[in-house]
Amino acid sequence: MKTYPIAIELTVWFDLGLNQYELVIDEEPKISIKRTDDVLHSRALSASEVSMLTEAIGVIKVPVTEESKGNPSTKASSSYELIIESAHFSLEFNWENLDVEASQSNAFESVVKLASLVQSLDLEH
């Protein structure tokens, strides 16, 4: 089955800077990674990586959760922005590590898993 091209953008802010990931899933799937040091790394994605990504995208759920009444003195150590786009959909998710920690229902599980998968691709090669 041929699917429409899919673009994924993930930006991760953390104490020491940020990492930006851009993935394109089409005839020639690839990933580009830019870190705080402004060095751009790009490589092709394997068929198994594309399969894992499309499977993770297919199970994305919108994180519906209660507003947390967190400690105002507690500062988030990381923030995330995840954008997934294709011909028939566009999804954007924003969260902090404190949101995930405060969620009793694992509402962020599917977006965290996809973000973790994208970040792990940086370590593959």
Image (cartoon, grey):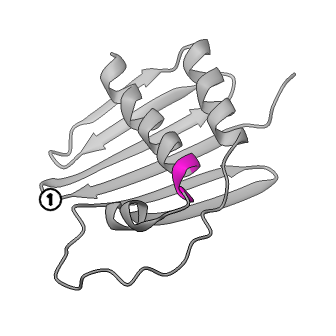
Q: Residue 65, how many percent across, how many down? A: 57, 71
Q: Residue 79, how many percent across, how many down? A: 33, 62
Instruction: Using residue 55 as the reference point, say whether residue 79 is left or right of it.
Output: left
Q: In which quarter of the image is the C terminus?
A: top left
Secondary structure, mark 1, is: loop
Seen in the picture, residue 117 relative to 34 is either above or below; the reply is above
Q: In which quarter of the image is the N terminus?
A: top right
Instruction: Using residue 86 as the reference point, say whether residue 103 is left or right of it.
Output: left
Q: Residue 10, how many percent across, how many down? A: 44, 50
Q: Determine which residue is flagged by label 1.
A: 15
Count the marks. 1
Q: Is residue 28 visible?
A: no
Instruction: Using residue 53 as the reference point, say whether residue 95 is left or right of it.
Output: left
Q: Please tell me which residue lies in front, 85 or 107.
A: 107
Instruction: Using residue 74 as the reference point, say whether residue 115 is left or right of it.
Output: right
Q: Can residue 49 be seen in this view?
A: yes
- Identify which amino acid the numbered label 1 is placed on: Asp
Q: Please tell me which residue lies in front, 22 or 79.
A: 79
Seen in the picture, residue 56 relative to 75 is either above or below; the reply is above
In the rendered structure, which segment of residues is drawn in magenta?
Answer: 106-110
Residue shown at the point (67%, 54%) measured from the top left: 61
Dominant SS of magenta comes to: loop
Residue shown at the point (33%, 60%) measured from the top left: 97
Q: Residue 82, how many percent across, how many down? A: 50, 55
Residue shown at the point (38%, 84%) measured from the top left: 69
